Amino acid sequence: MSASVIRSGRYVAPGMGPSVHELRERDMLTLAPQRVAEIGRAKLIISAVLSLHRMHRDDFFGHRRDLHLVAARRDAAHRLREAGFTSGQIGRILKRNHTTVLNYFDGLRDGKRRRLNERAVLRHVDPELREPIQMIAQAEGVTLEMLIAQWVGERARYEIGRAETADKREEK
């Protein structure tokens, strides 16, 4: 048993640190004021987000994934990150896995998804018109999907107006 250490009735391999139980006791004694301050900051941030998004605490911490709930959680995660919390701490605060929190910060993923969607839409457009359409969307500061949806709406209104005009002519 010279190669091992017995602590609190548990075997600890050489070179291993204190047990989780011992760490918790030590943390509670040495980090209590810091933790209390962190908890207070986190509560203030969450309260501000709940107020801003006009949301109930149960909805915010619940399991639903509605867009407005995810947006509020993402907002809270960004504010907590700015306050110096790690993704693991943010996950515990938001009652989410830390990988979910990492996805809240993954703007690159959203950009990649948007580019893939644009390519899928552009495949159905005349090749000569692809670049001008992209330039117009960029100049107007909208996504390609939004621009095309706007154009489809305008065309539908035009066709409806044309059909109504033709119907009136037939009535005469």
Image: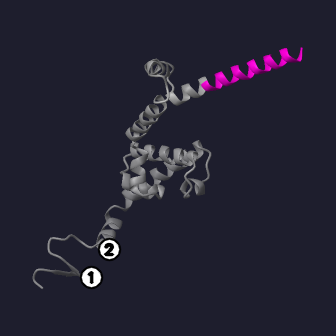
Quarter-wise, where is residue 78 in the image? Answer: top left
What's under tag 1, amino acid-wise? Ser
* Among numbered discs 1 and 2, the one appearing first in the sequence: 1
Q: Main secondary structure of the magenta part?
A: helix
- The percent position of residue 104, horizontal first and vertical second, equals 43, 46
Q: Which mark is residue 21?
A: 2
Q: As rendered, which of 127 and 57 lies closer to the eye?
A: 127
Circle 2 sits in a helix, a strand or a loop, which is it?
helix
Point 29% across, 69% down: residue: 23
Q: Quadrant of residue 107?
A: top left
Specify the segment rendered in magenta: 152-172
What x and y, as percent, mark residue 88?
37, 55
Return the residue nearer the eye: 152 or 63.
Answer: 152
Q: Which residue sits at x=47%, y=59%?
A: 95
Closer to the camera, 57 or 161?
Answer: 161
Point out the residue furthest to the left here: 2
Proximity of marks 1 and 2: CB atoms separated by less than 8 Å: yes
According to the picture, the residue beneath numbered tag 1 turns out to be 8
| Residue 22 located left or right of residue 124 | left
Q: Point out the image quarter for the C terminus.
A: top right
Q: Is residue 131 above or below residue 20?
A: above
Residue at the image point whose x is 46% and y is 52% from the top: 42
**Amino acid type for the residue under numbered disc 2:** His
The type of colouring in the image is one colour
State the CA–CA distance, disc 1 to disc 2: 9 Å
Helix, strand or loop status at disc 1: loop
